[in-house]
Amino acid sequence: MQITETSAEGLKHAFTIVVDAGTLAARTDERLEQLKQTVQIKGFRRGKVPVSLLKKLYGDGVRGEVMQAAVQDSTESALKQHDLKPAMQPKIDVVKFENDSDLEFTLEVEVLPAIEPMDFTTLKLERPVCEVTPDEADEAVQRLAEQQRAFTDKADDAGAEDGDVVVIDYDGKIDDVPFEGGKSENVSVQIGQKMFIPGFEEQLVGAKKGDEKQINVTFPEEYGATHLAGKNAVFDVKVHQIRAPEAITIDDAFAEKLGMENLEKLREAMLERITTDYKNVSRSRLKRALLDTLDKAHAFEVPPGMLAGEEDQIWQQFQQELQRRGQTMADQDKSEEELRTEYRVIADRRVRLGLLLAEIGQRNNITVSEDAMRDALFRQASQFPGQEKLLFEYYQKNPQALASLRAPLYEDKVVDFILELAQVTDAPVSREELFKEPDDED
């Protein structure tokens, strides 16, 4: 076997590999001898079939099998010889493979970069923390009660008031032209909830059962569907029913309806849930700060193929989001080239951090236990009641899907490992500060 490196540019390496005809012939004869012991052909006892007949019947298949094994073995030898770790599946092109001749093929491979993680004990990070107050638990109970509030039909001649639910049909037009999503029937609108276009709910005040009226509104400039943003619209509305909210009483009986022992236990449950939510957000903010720091502290080239694959995935997600919103590139504030440049930066960050975390995990023997994977599978299955068996079978048959389930678990374990070494201090913040969205969206 002859291995010749023909190029080495950055993380890209190329080889020409030749496996001599003698080696191939010996492997072919060896494989035919193995077949001789197992194959059954009419007129011959097992193990007595002439090799010449086997070669005639199975020669092409055996040669193909031997060629594939030779390519795999010599590829592994080339990578081991040059101490290369492939980042992706190598590209292989067979140049020559004929009867009684050498096998010659080219091998192109992108390799993982050399990564030297920083000293994590030098990291200084702040964990934003927010203390939950009893008032927040009471507010949560109040919101829960509002969600459980019952509504009663009002008299036919009673006008709609703030807080009432008005059941309507509506048909919207812009410049007398209907638009997609502008028509619906039997829609419940609660006045004052601000779930509709600004000004829509307010114009339902005073409406009575059976009324037909026009509502004039202007879509906000920042409206999600950019083809409607800033446009004036007229909705023809027909009122079917008006329902008034009933009084709510927050007491032990209310708590019991929700499966709690009493009101105090309900408050405790709300307090616990809010505390958990705050801790999750706090960890998310700390993790984000850690990843930002790691991103700035580690500069290395990423495999071009991995970068291109991540770029494509981000772009496809962007295209799907455009389609979901009913938009096109013409609706965007930036050109395709500008957007692709931005997404390339995001892709580079994702790939680089992924490689860095994988290197840290490997160096420190970090793994995801079977118990953790099983818990993750059960959590996933709980989202599809009645289809648990199908979901388990899907993951069993799809290693790639199972890997995607393991990936976030592995990442969190590596992050926890780093945070244990880093200098992390708690920084008290308000609820507003804790839930403030980061400036960028990557």
Image (cartoon, rainbow, N blue to C red):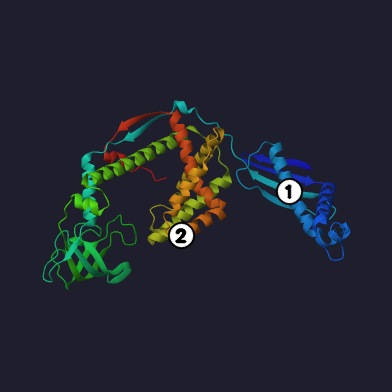
Task: Name the spot of residue 88 as percent of width and height, x first.
Answer: 61, 46
Q: Which numbered disc, 2 or 1, marks the residue that appears first in the sequence?
A: 1
Given residues 288 and 278, the one toward you in this image is 278
Task: Name the spot of residue 56 as percent of width and height, x first.
Answer: 85, 61
Which residue sits furthest left?
Answer: 157
Task: Name the spot of residue 162 as percent of width and height, x first.
Answer: 15, 59
Callout 1: helix, strand or loop?
Answer: helix
Which residue sits furthest top?
Answer: 122
Which quadrant of the view contains residue 59? bottom right
* Observer able to see residue 327: no
Which residue sits furthest front?
Answer: 261
- Residue 372, placed above or below residue 317: above
Residues under labels 2 and 1: Cα distance?
43 Å
Task: Name the spot of residue 265 as percent of width and height, x first.
Answer: 25, 44
Q: Which residue is mark 2?
A: 387
Q: Name which residue type carries label 1.
A: Val
Q: Quadrant of the C terminus?
A: top left
Q: Quadrant of the N terminus?
A: top right
Q: Are marks 2 and 1 in contact (CB under 8 Å)?
A: no
Q: Which residue is mark 1?
A: 71
Closest to the camera, between mark 2 and mark 1, is 2
Q: Name which residue type carries label 2.
A: Gln
- Residue 403, placed above or below residue 387: above
Mark 1 is surrounded, within 10 Å at the Cα level, by few (under 14), some (14 to 19) or many (20 or more) other residues, namely: many
* Observer able to see residue 139: yes
